[in-house]
Each structure stands twice: as structure tokens, then as C-alpha cells.
Image (cartoon, rainbow, N blue to C red):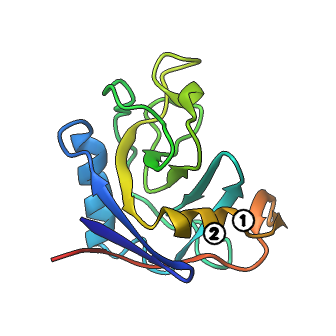
Amino acid sequence: MITIKTNHGDIKIDLFEDKAPISCENFRQYMADGHFNDTIFHRVIPNFMVQGGGFDADMQQKSTRDPIKNEADNGESNRRGTLAMARTNVVDSATSQFFINLKDNTFLDHGTRDFGYAVFAEVSDGMDVVDAIAGVATGNHGGHQDVPVETVSIIEVTVDD
């Protein structure tokens, strides 16, 4: 189990190692490198998702490794409480950013409207924390929309013993 420690509380997640091995290894490597430490949830859209893993508190994007292959065709669905890899319009463009689905977002699944967004984990404990994050006030900041007015920090991401 992995813990995402935030300034709103802890979110525990279980990785789908068998269904999304590339995405899980990618997440583990960013975690081992300390990449997620002191990042933020920079995009919060109620009734949709919260996104993080790529920006610091000053809304500066962190350097990433090369993009990975999109595993959205793994049979997992973007349902409430699952984590998926964020990406651009390019299918294989995911790097460090991920999002947590606040509701069933099946329109993001493979083949629904495009290749889809790869689900690689799910929240096993702390969905109340995710819901609290979803309730923060947002605005525009540095050319980005839906940015929390008060920073929602990811303090660190750790593997539980």
C-alpha cells in the first residue's frame, strides 16, 4: 500500500500492478525519486476529479522523465476512487501527473471517445480526504483554471511497511 500524505490528510492507495505494470512502475519510480514531495493538487473540479503530481506550490511545472505507453486498454474503468494517468491529447504522453476520479467517469475509459486514460490504482482509505480536497475554493492562477485558492500540498508519497 502507498500513502499520499497531504495537508488535508492521508490518502492510501493500492496499485493495479497486474493490470497497469508500466503505469505502476512509472508511479513507483517518481515516488522513489521524491518527485511527488512538495507538489500540489493543481486542478480541482468538483464532481469530476482532482489532479496532481506535476506542479510545485508556485505553479512551476517539475521536470519529468520521458512519457510512457498508455495502458487505458487494461479493462479498468475510471470509476469513483480510482487513479488514472493524466495526459495531453497525445495518447502516449503521460509522465508524472495523475488524477483521482470523484465519480464514475466512464467517458474517460478506453474506446469511449478516444484511447482513454489509464487507470492504475484505487483509493483504499482516505476518500473522505479526496472529497475534502474536491470542496476547496478554486480560481485561475498562472494561466491555469480550477487551481485551489489555498494550496493543497502533497507532502510526500511513501510505501507503507
Q: Are marks 1 and 2 in contact (CB under 8 Å)?
A: yes
Question: In this orientation, which residue lies closer to the viewer: 153 or 49?
Answer: 49
Q: Which mark is residue 132?
A: 2
Residue 139 versus residue 104 in the image, above or below: below
Residue depicted at x 72% and y 65% = 135
- In percent of width and height, residue 84 lies at 45, 45
Q: Residue furthest right?
A: 139
Residue depicted at x 34% and y 60% = 13
- In percent of width and height, residue 152 lies at 62, 76
Looking at the image, residue 75 sits to the left or right of residue 52; the answer is: left
- In percent of width and height, residue 52 lies at 55, 62
Residue depicted at x 63% and y 79% = 57
**Image quarter for residue 55?**
bottom right
Q: Which mark is residue 135?
A: 1
Mark 1 crowd level (few <14, some 14–19, many ≥20, 10 Å Cα): some
Mark 2 crowd level (few <14, some 14–19, many ≥20, 10 Å Cα): few
